[in-house]
């Protein structure tokens, strides 16, 4: 079977619930609305689910123009206009990035959920919220077979939910971790062409159930056991990040060619 797009995931608000898509337009800086918004603490530092696990339980829904937002929280829905306020500089992965605060009820709701004062912000430019934006790594790939291998290594009760890993493109029809061999090579996905630049080392966020936010699967110990000796660019590797060489449309079921 040839390689195909198995899933497409984006996170319009970094650290909140993943959205599943049937198609995306991959631009020069990734998907325009992927990680476009972020949550920061009082010092302007990015907060992710590693620091506030409850964030993964919040489902954001934007309208088509991203001018209206509803946050579905465990305590109910928070609804309002995306009203941009003061400009500020936020700290994300040791980068200083221009952003604007989102006024309205959202920050208060997220503060109540996280038990600390936080602010919802929008990056001024798309692509700034992805983990490896400093290396122009604006899209990520993971094979479906890798999830099966991890489930076996972790002695999981069933399939491992790909949303744990917050990867943009799932790949079916290849062997587990075959995507590692794509690093440095051109990979066509639908209309787009990307070049994987390195492995993605995992953190404690992947131990969290994407629905409940509970830490219920020791993904890191499993990766250390069966992937610890792999010759990769980052420790505890699972999937790869890639640069966008040629923008284009990507849809579920699209062929992937190296």
Image (cartoon, rainbow, N blue to C red):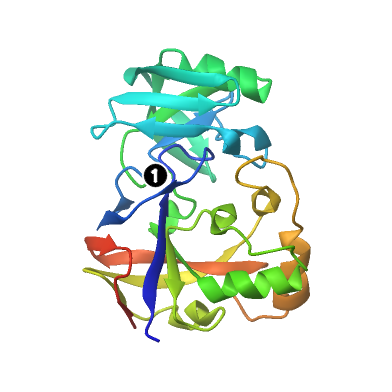
Is residue 210 shown to the viewer in this render? yes
For disc 1, the neighbor class at 10 Å (few under 14, some 14 to 19, many from 20) is many
Q: Is residue 188 left or right of residue 161?
A: left
Q: Residue at x 55, y 17 (%)?
A: 109
On the image, the x and y values in percent for residue 45 come to 56, 32
Q: Residue at x 51, y 36 (%)?
A: 91
Q: Of residues 249 and 20, which is closer to you in this image?
A: 20
Q: Is residue 168 left or right of residue 239?
A: left
Rendering quarter of residue 154: bottom right
Q: Residue at x 72, y 80 (%)?
A: 229
Establish if 137 lies above or below 64: below
On the image, the x and y values in percent for residue 12 come to 40, 40
Quarter of the image for the C terminus: give it: bottom left
Establish if 199 lies above or below 67: below
Establish if 113 lies above or below 48: above
Q: Is residue 49 left or right of residue 218?
A: left
Q: Is residue 201 left or right of residue 171?
A: right
Q: Of residues 165 and 161, which is closer to you in this image?
A: 161
Q: Residue at x 61, y 42 (%)?
A: 211
Query: Label 1, on which residue?
Result: 128
Quarter of the image for the N terminus: give it: bottom left
Give the secondary structure at mark 1. loop
Is residue 137 shown to the viewer in this render? no
Give the farthest residue toward the bottom.
1
Q: Of residues 172 and 223, which is closer to you in this image?
A: 172
On the image, the x and y values in percent for residue 186 come to 32, 79
On the image, the x and y values in percent for residue 157 come to 74, 63
How many numbered discs sit on the rendered protein? Answer: 1
Rendering quarter of residue 86: top left
């Amino acid at each position: 079977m040839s390689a195909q797009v198995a899933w497409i995931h984006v996170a319009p608000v970094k650290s909140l619930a993943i959205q599943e898509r049937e198609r995306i337009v991959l631009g020069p800086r990734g998907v325009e609305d992927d990680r476009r918004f972020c949550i920061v603490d009082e010092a302007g530092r990015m907060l992710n689910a590693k620091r506030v696990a409850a964030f993964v339980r919040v489902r954001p829904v934007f309208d088509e123009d991203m001018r209206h937002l509803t946050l579905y929280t465990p305590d109910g829905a928070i609804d309002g206009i995306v009203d941009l306020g003061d400009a500020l500089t936020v700290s994300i992965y040791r980068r200083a990035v221009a952003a604007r605060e989102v006024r309205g009820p959202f920050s208060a709701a997220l503060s109540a959920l996280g038990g600390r004062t936080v602010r919802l912000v929008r990056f001024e430019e798309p692509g700034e919220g992805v983990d490896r934006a400093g290396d122009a790594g604006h899209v990520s790939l993971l094979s479906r077979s890798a999830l099966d291998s991890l489930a076996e290594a972790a002695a999981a009760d069933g399939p491992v939910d790909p949303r744990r890993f917050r990867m943009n493109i799932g790949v079916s029809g290849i062997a587990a971790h075959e995507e590692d061999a794509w690093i440095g090579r051109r990979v066509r996905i639908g209309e787009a062409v990307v070049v994987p630049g390195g492995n993605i080392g995992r953190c404690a966020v992947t131990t969290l159930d994407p629905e409940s936010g509970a830490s219920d699967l020791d993904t890191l110990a499993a990766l250390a056991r069966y992937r610890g000796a792999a010759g990769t660019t980052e420790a505890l590797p699972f999937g790869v990040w890639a640069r966008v060489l040629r923008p284009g449309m990507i849809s579920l079921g699209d062929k992937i060619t190296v």
